[in-house]
Image: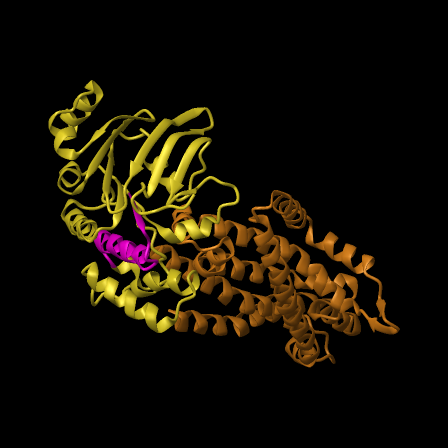
Chain colours: A orange, B yellow
């Protein structure tokens, strides 16, 4: 099944590019390179930007997952103050628009920080990654909380009756059962995050979107607009769609098993 | 005050317990001697399971006293974990850890709670699996076992902690009729070996055969208690008579 799906996606790439490019091919003015030739010319540069999108998605996800895991565990803390605070933080970052969070982070964090004499520069890319990690953190926190609370209370009780401490129960008995439940929503979140990475172009990160716009500005040919953005769409689609499909399969598998 | 084996191993006195506005235990008292098998019977909602949970501090009492081996269970300074190492409990829904094999389920608590050596624990766990007649099922996951088999793994898991007292909370209520017997046989073996057992059960035949003492509870109080041959054949209280007429 994966094989055939994969083949379909690979076939889709040139097909979609062609469909998008063809009507415009005729529009290419005489004496200028064709649409496909122009796309190819800019592809290395835009693809480099695209790799930055992927890098940002991976780093934001890692950072957001780390913070979110802590926040999620804090949400189920027996200490009510800790639990309530963690809940409030989670809700705040889950319900904030990503773009606003991104601006806020970039503006709030200085461009460099001095630590014991030395100065650590904070490039916009790093700040943008942090900005995207915040909503990820909020969402991961909810994924963790939901998964832990979906484990039947009998598991806690029997562990208690066997004299496990709360910490042991959580780490040895509850969380291992949660991993499976957390994986599909976590992967889904990653796909959503990846699709949101072009947002960081707005704060000046030179990712695929910025590069595409730069290329278009350099070419200054309106017939290139649709094919170039189309190419970008296809790349994102090819990266994210398999993740979505895989997530669905995992969901089905775990759903059946549980 | 030090506890000696000639005193009751479990001493429950005037225990009250409410959930919100509902009082489920209204002054329950009960003494269990070491090595005794006690069955608690009664209609659903009469507070039987809650009473059992008060013994290993899974439920907190509002008033009264519960002593296990002379130690007050509801003393705020009590080491709850030490208490639970002495008191094993088996649940209606087995509650095995689904991500671990049967053998791992049995081994986990001795390894991580008691901190015993893996080799010793494994040998004991395998022995316990034989004892509950599940040799050969060591590497099966709970999901691959029948209800009766899972419940016997749960018993082995509890026994691996070498408890002094075993609590059984309606352990056959979720089982198919044909697997009830295999679980009851396991418990009977345990009782014959002299383990102190406190059971909440609907299996009247089993209570009659195995119990040293039977308590009948209704609406949060102990209505009547006595040796099974007397309680079952000559019940005194009309509520006991009525209940027994339905279940026997």
On whether residue B163 falls in the magenta region, the answer is: yes
- Magenta region: B145-168
Q: Is residue B126 above or below residue B222?
A: below
Q: Of A152 and B25, which appears nearest the observer?
A: B25
On whether residue B148 falls in the magenta region, the answer is: yes
Q: Is residue B170 above or below residue A15?
A: above
Residue appearing at x 21%, y 34% in the figure: B214
Q: Is residue B30 visible?
A: yes
Q: Residue furthest right?
A: A117
Q: Which quarter of the figure has residue B170?
A: top left
Q: Is residue A147 above or below residue A17?
A: above
Q: Of A217 and A48, which appears nearest the observer?
A: A48
Residue appearing at x 52%, y 41% in the figure: B76
Q: Is residue B248 visible?
A: no
The picture places residue A45, in percent across and down from the top left corner, at 71, 78
Q: Of A243 and A173, which appears nearest the observer?
A: A173
Q: Residue furthest top?
A: B238
The picture places residue B238, in percent across and down from the top left corner, at 19, 18
Q: In which quadrant will I find the C terminus of chain B?
A: top left
Q: Which quarter of the figure has residue A107?
A: bottom right
The picture places residue A246, in percent across and down from the top left corner, at 45, 65
The picture places residue B133, in percent across and down from the top left corner, at 18, 60
Residue appearing at x 56%, y 58% in the figure: A189
Numbered-mark total = 0
Q: Is residue B228 above or below residue A108?
A: above
**Left or right of residue B82, residue A218 in this image:** right
Q: Of A142 and B18, which appears nearest the observer?
A: B18
Q: In which quadrant will I find the N terminus of chain B?
A: top left
**Left or right of residue A42, residue A14 in this image:** left
């Amino acid at each position: 099944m994966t094989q055939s799906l994969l083949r379909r996606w690979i076939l889709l790439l040139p097909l979609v590019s062609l469909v998008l490019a063809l009507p415009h091919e005729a529009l290419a003015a005489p004496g200028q390179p064709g649409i496909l030739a122009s796309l190819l010319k800019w592809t290395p540069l835009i693809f480099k930007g695209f790799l930055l999108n992927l890098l940002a998605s991976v780093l934001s996800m890692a950072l957001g997952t780390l913070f979110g895991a802590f926040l999620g565990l804090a949400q189920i803390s027996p200490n009510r103050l800790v639990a309530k605070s963690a809940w409030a933080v989670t809700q705040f970052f889950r319900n904030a628009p990503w773009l606003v969070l991104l601006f806020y982070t970039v503006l709030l964090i200085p461009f460099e920080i001095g630590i014991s004499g030395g100065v650590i520069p904070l490039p916009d890319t790093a700040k943008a990654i942090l900005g995207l990690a915040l909503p990820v953190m909020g969402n991961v926190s909810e994924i963790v909380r939901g998964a832990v609370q979906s484990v039947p209370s009998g598991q806690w009780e029997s562990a208690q009756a066997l004299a496990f401490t709360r910490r042991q129960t959580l780490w040895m008995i509850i969380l291992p059962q949660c991993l499976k439940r957390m994986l599909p929503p976590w992967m889904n979140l990653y796909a959503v995050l990846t699709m949101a990475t072009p947002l960081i172009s707005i704060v000046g990160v030179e990712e695929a979107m910025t590069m595409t716009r730069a290329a278009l500005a350099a070419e200054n040919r309106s017939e290139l607009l649709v094919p170039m953005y189309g190419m970008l769409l296809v790349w994102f689609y090819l990266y994210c769609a398999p993740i979505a499909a895989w997530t669905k399969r995992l969901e089905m598998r775990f759903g059946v098993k549980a | 005050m030090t506890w000696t084996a000639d005193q009751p191993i479990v001493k429950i006195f005037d225990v009250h317990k409410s959930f919100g506005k509902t009082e489920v235990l209204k002054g329950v008292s009960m003494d269990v001697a070491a090595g005794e098998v006690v069955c608690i019977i009664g209609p659903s909602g009469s507070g039987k399971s809650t009473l059992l949970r008060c013994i290993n501090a899974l439920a907190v009492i509002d008033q009264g006293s519960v002593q296990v081996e002379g130690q007050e269970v509801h003393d705020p300074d009590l080491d709850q974990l030490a208490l639970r190492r002495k008191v094993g409990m088996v649940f209606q829904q087995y509650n095995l850890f689904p991500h671990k094999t049967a053998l791992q389920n049995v081994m986990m608590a001795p390894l991580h709670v008691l901190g015993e050596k893996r080799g010793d624990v494994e040998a004991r766990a395998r022995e316990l699996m034989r004892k509950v007649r599940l040799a050969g099922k060591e590497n099966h996951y709970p999901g691959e076992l029948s209800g009766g088999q899972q419940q016997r793994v749960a018993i082995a898991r509890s026994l691996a902690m070498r408890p002094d007292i075993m609590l059984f909370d309606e352990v056959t209520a979720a089982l198919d009729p044909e697997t009830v017997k295999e679980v009851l046989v396991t418990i009977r073996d345990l009782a014959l070996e002299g383990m102190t057992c406190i059971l909440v059960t609907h299996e009247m035949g089993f209570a009659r055969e195995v119990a040293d003492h039977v308590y009948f509870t209704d609406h949060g109080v102990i209505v009547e208690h006595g040796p099974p041959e007397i309680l079952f054949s000559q019940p005194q209280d009309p509520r006991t008579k009525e209940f027994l007429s339905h279940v026997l």
